[in-house]
């Protein structure tokens, strides 16, 4: 079960953790702690797998808890993980410039807005999964995600 949870959820948990804690080494700690919690007490679906919404909820809570205990500046490191691709070097340079603008724009969002954007737009979670992961009603998720997208759009327009 733990191996399947790692294969299925580790990348999503890492990106979510990094969007909250803003420190790659602390994000690694969040992933490790989340996987330990999954190993100890995760519910399993009909196929014997850990539900993604449960994992992201635990990861989010773990990341927030670690931030509270460390009392460090969560904005000290603003790196998001990059996805591997087979593009040309010129396209890579363009993509990195755009990614830098996106990182800067994401820094202007509050923690919940940034989390919503990462879960929906980067990890492709459904609204229902996000609602479960963040302990919010579905209409609230839709409203906050709409507002977060608007804030992100305004922040990106400010950098162009």
Image (cartoon, rainbow, N blue to C red):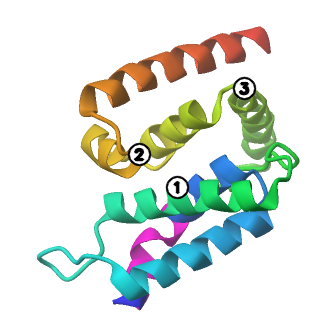
Q: Closer to the observer: label 1 or label 3?
A: 1
Q: Is residue 159 left or right of residue 5?
A: right
Label 3: element kind: helix
Residue at which label 1 appears: 60
Q: Is residue 122 left or right of residue 30?
A: left
Label 2: element kind: helix
1 and 2 marks in contact (CB < 8 Å): yes
Residue plotted at (65% across, 29% down): 110
Residue 128, image x, y percentages? 25, 42
Residue 64, image x, y percentages? 62, 53
Residue at which label 2 appears: 134
Q: Quadrant of the N terminus?
A: bottom left
Q: Is residue 23 left or right of residue 36?
A: right
Q: Is residue 83 visible?
A: no
Residue in front for this viewpoint, 157 or 64: 64
Residue 97, image x, y percentages? 80, 34
Residue plotted at (42% across, 57% down): 57
Residue 87 part of the magenta segment: no
Residue in front for this viewpoint, 96 or 39: 39
Residue at which label 3 appears: 105
The residue range painted magenta reads 3-12
Q: What is the spatial separation of the Cα atoms under label 1 and label 2, in whole angstroms?
A: 8 Å
């Amino acid at each position: 079960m733990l191996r399947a949870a790692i294969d299925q959820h580790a990348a999503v948990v890492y990106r979510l953790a990094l969007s909250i804690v803003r420190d790659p080494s602390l994000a690694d700690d969040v992933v490790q702690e989340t996987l330990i919690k999954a190993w100890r007490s995760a519910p399993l679906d009909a196929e014997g797998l850990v539900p993604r919404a449960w994992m992201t909820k635990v990861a989010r809570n773990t990341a927030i808890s670690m931030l509270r205990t460390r009392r460090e500046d969560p904005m000290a490191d603003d790196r998001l993980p990059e996805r591997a691709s087979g593009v040309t070097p010129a396209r890579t340079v363009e993509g990195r410039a755009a990614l830098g603008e996106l990182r800067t724009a994401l820094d202007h969002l509050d923690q919940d807005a940034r989390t919503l954007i990462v879960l929906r737009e980067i990890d492709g979670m459904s609204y229902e999964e996000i609602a479960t992961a963040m302990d919010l009603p579905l209409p609230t998720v839709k409203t906050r995600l709409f507002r977060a997208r608007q804030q992100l759009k305004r922040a990106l327009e400010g950098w162009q």
